[in-house]
Image (spheres, grey):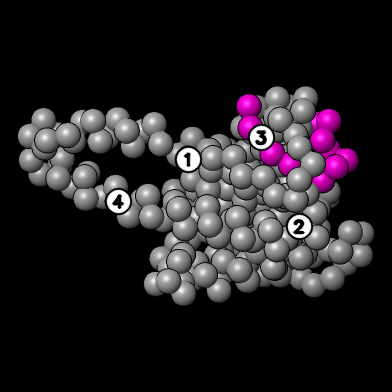
């Protein structure tokens, strides 16, 4: 398990076509190497186009469409960047709803480059410390975020980075955040099961423990 700290976790990768390829492929490889399963989700079926800035690179098979995918089955979310991809997703209510699910349930989100645009449009950027590609820093500040110019920023359940050169730091903190989430979730079912079978009032400290878990 030490070599595969994310064994058993499922991570959704949400992207429209014309995304920044390295910001999908390199974090995805890091997730797989750590033992996680990933699913490439897009508003469109078929394939999506990877880019290096404005140059087309490879095409990738869409494994699930956004309309047919429920976010409940995933432990984390990866949002690659690329201006065309992020600009399309941010305008889609379905994509906004997908992102809000992860925030409302305090699940890890790893978001890079232009992808924080979707956080802003989904209404989940306000009050968050984050970074992004420099050209959208005003958008993020106008959305109520505390924008900083750093290679990687971790704020509770959110990891953000600026650009492809930040990917090594982005991957490191993404894996660490997901591993912490896995450890936390691994502790929760036992207390829940005990409460189900004998009742919270009969478990010493059970109510206190549940309250503490909501604060964490």
The residue identified by callout 4 is 187
- Give the numbered dot on residue 106: 1
Residue toward you, 176 or 140: 176
Q: Secondary structure at mark 1?
A: loop
Dot 3 or dot 2: first in sequence order is 3
Distance from the alpha carbon under mark 3 to that under mark 2: 17 Å
State which quarter of the image contains the N terminus: bottom left
Q: Is residue 33 left or right of residue 48?
A: left
Q: Secondary structure at mark 4?
A: helix
Dot 1 or dot 3: first in sequence order is 1
Q: Is residue 137 left or right of residue 44?
A: right
Question: Mark 4–mark 3 contact, CB under 8 Å?
Answer: no
**Quarter of the rendering containing residue 89:** top right
- Give the numbered dot on residue 166: 2
Please report the bounds of the magenta region as a residue range. 127-139
Question: Is residue 205 something that shows in the picture?
Answer: yes
């Amino acid at each position: 398990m030490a070599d595969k700290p994310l064994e058993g976790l499922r991570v959704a990768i949400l992207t429209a076509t014309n995304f920044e390829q390295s910001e999908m492929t390199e974090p995805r490889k890091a997730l797989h190497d750590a033992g996680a399963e990933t699913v490439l989700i897009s508003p469109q079926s078929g394939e999506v186009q990877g880019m290096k800035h404005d140059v087309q690179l490879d095409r990738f098979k869409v494994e699930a469409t956004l309309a047919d995918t429920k976010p409940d089955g995933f432990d984390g979310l990866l949002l690659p960047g690329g201006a065309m991809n992020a600009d399309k997703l941010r305008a889609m209510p379905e994509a906004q709803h997908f992102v809000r699910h992860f925030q409302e349930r305090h699940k890890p989100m790893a978001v890079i480059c232009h992808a924080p645009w979707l956080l802003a449009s989904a209404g989940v950027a306000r009050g968050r410390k984050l970074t992004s590609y420099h050209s959208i820093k005003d958008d993020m500040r106008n959305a109520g975020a505390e924008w900083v110019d750093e290679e990687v920023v971790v704020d509770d359940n959110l990891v953000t980075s600026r650009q492809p050169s930040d990917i090594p730091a982005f991957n490191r903190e993404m894996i660490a955040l997901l591993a912490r989430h896995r450890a936390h979730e691994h502790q929760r079912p036992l207390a829940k099961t005990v409460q189900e079978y004998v009742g919270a009032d009969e478990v010493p400290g059970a109510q206190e423990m549940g309250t503490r878990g909501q604060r964490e």
